[in-house]
Amino acid sequence: MNTKDFFAEKAKDYDNEESRTQNVSTIAQTILNEVVFSKEMSIMDFGSGTGLLLSEIAPYVGEITAVDVSSSMIEVLTSKKEAIKCPLEIVQMDLTTATLDLKFDAIISSMTMHHIKDTLAMFKIFYSLLKDNGTIAIADLDTEDGSFHTEDTGVFHCGFDRDEFVKIAKSVGFKDIKIQDASIASKPTGNYSVFLLTAKK
């Protein structure tokens, strides 16, 4: 397991950046408009970070499993656990190399996929972790020029081409695939469009 925590320096102030919280909030709204959640549902937030996304989805689901590789981000999330409006299980692991013995009704993820080297392998993992008819809702950057990340946080992709992203989801077996505008992430280096891919197993 790669032991470098790329977010060690950033975690404690992560939620203080208004453009970041605004971006995730808009993504959350797009997900809520698109996915029908219920109190019976058990969902996973992949790359949960400090819990910005799951905090907004929590009131609408039964329980959430938060998965992240960064111990410093998990520390921040753990400190907020009491405020999350549903039961929350926090798991620190690298889902690309370790397996989770659970099945979920939905998997949500925001701005994490560009940190994953093998996109196809990750989609296969998502597929295997979903119950039949389960849903994925994955938000990430459209293809950008590399200026979105000004420091090294373990980035493998400068965003994604939407058609390619859809193709990968389809090749794994996902159906009812839809991709749409989710948000605009504003940074000093510019504005970056974010998409949301939703699909069913």
Image: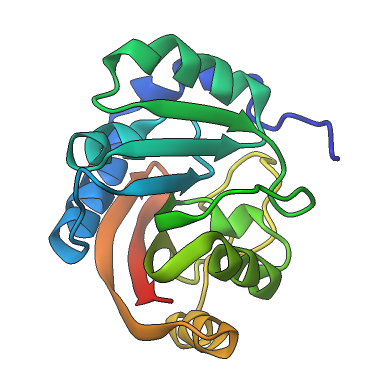
Quarter that holds the N terminus: top right
Residue at 53% across, 27% down:
90
From the viewer's perspective, is 89 left or right of 87? Answer: right
Q: Quadrant of the C terminus?
A: bottom left
Q: Quadrant of residue 53?
A: top left
Residue 20 seen in the figure: no
- Residue 95, position in %: x, y? 68, 49
Tell me if I can see residue 37 in this picture: yes
Front residue of 68/149: it is: 68
On screen, residue 42 above or below 196:
above
106 vs 117, nearest the viewer? 106
Question: In the image, is residue 114 above or below residue 153?
Answer: below
Whole-percent x, y for residue 97 in the image = 79, 52
Q: Residue at x 53, y 86 (%)?
A: 173
Residue located at (33% from left, 11% from top): 82
In the image as oriented, which residue stretches furthest toward the left?
33
On screen, residue 128 versus residue 121, left or right, reads left
Image coords of residue 67 (percent x, y)? 56, 39
Q: Quadrant of residue 21?
A: top left
Residue 163 position within the rendered picture, expressed as x and y whole percent measured from the top left: 45, 88
Q: Is residue 6 left or right of residue 170?
A: right
Q: Nearer the viewer, residue 58 or 168?
A: 58
- Looking at the picture, does residue 76 appear above or below residue 155? above
Q: How many marks?
A: 0
Vertical relation: 34 (above or below) 84: below
